Amino acid sequence: MACDTLGRPVRFLIAPGQSHDILAVPALLDGHRPGAVLADRAYDANSLRAHLARIGAEAVIPSTRSRKTPIPHDPRIYKLRNRVERCFNKLKHFRRFATRFDRLASHYLAFVHIAASMLWMR
């Protein structure tokens, strides 16, 4: 999920359950020009950082502990990442979103868009 500066959902993509979410980030950002991309340590990969540099976005991603030379990030901007987490929390108030009873990904994605539009109307 991509959120705007205020923590409102902007774009969704459902990735296969057996793959890591980092593989879906380039498709999620396709056509957007974010100034910065905030993500947690799990998204620390050279390939993602290179993609963000190509589209002109600042990578505000802390380095993993296993990285030999840590890459610095702006901790003030990184604190704003909680807005994405709060957006997920608001979406999880919708039971259908949290439990994912829908059998088809298209039906689930349709409800995600309905729930997101309800968040935008608040």
Image (cartoon, helix red, strand yellow):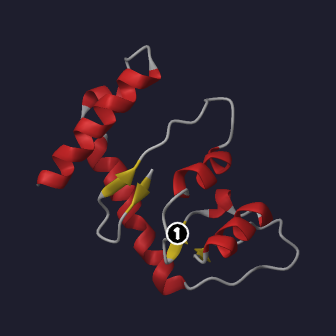
Residue closest to the eye, 120 or 38: 120
Name the residue at the top extreme.
103
Dot 1: within a 10 Å radius of its alpha carbon, few (fewer than 14), some, or many (20 or more) residues?
many
Residue 24 coordinates in the image, percent (x, y): 61, 46
What residue is drawn where x is 60% and y is 78%? 56
Name the residue at the left extreme.
122
What residue is drawn where x is 77% and y is 62%? 47
Residue closest to the eye, 20 or 33: 33
Judge whether 73 appears above or below 48 on screen. below
Q: Mark 1 falls on what kind of element?
A: strand
What residue is drawn where x is 54% and y is 58%? 29
User: In screen coordinates, is 18 left or right of 120?
Assistant: right
User: In screen coordinates, is 106 left or right of 15?
Assistant: left
Q: Which quadrant of the view contains residue 109?
A: top left
What residue is drawn where x is 62% and y is 82%? 73
The amino acid sitting under disc 1 is Leu
Q: Which quadrant of the view contains residue 122?
A: bottom left
Residue 68 coordinates in the image, percent (x, y): 88, 74
Judge whether 109 appears above or below 77 on screen. above
Name the residue at the front extreme.
31
Residue closest to the eye, 121 or 75: 121
Q: Is residue 105 visible?
A: yes
Q: How many marks?
A: 1
Q: Is residue 61 visible?
A: no
Q: Which residue is mark 1?
A: 38
Residue 91 coordinates in the image, percent (x, y): 29, 43
User: In screen coordinates, is 71 left or right of 95?
Assistant: right
Judge whether 102 appears above or below 20 on screen. above
Judge whether 116 appears above or below 110 on screen. below
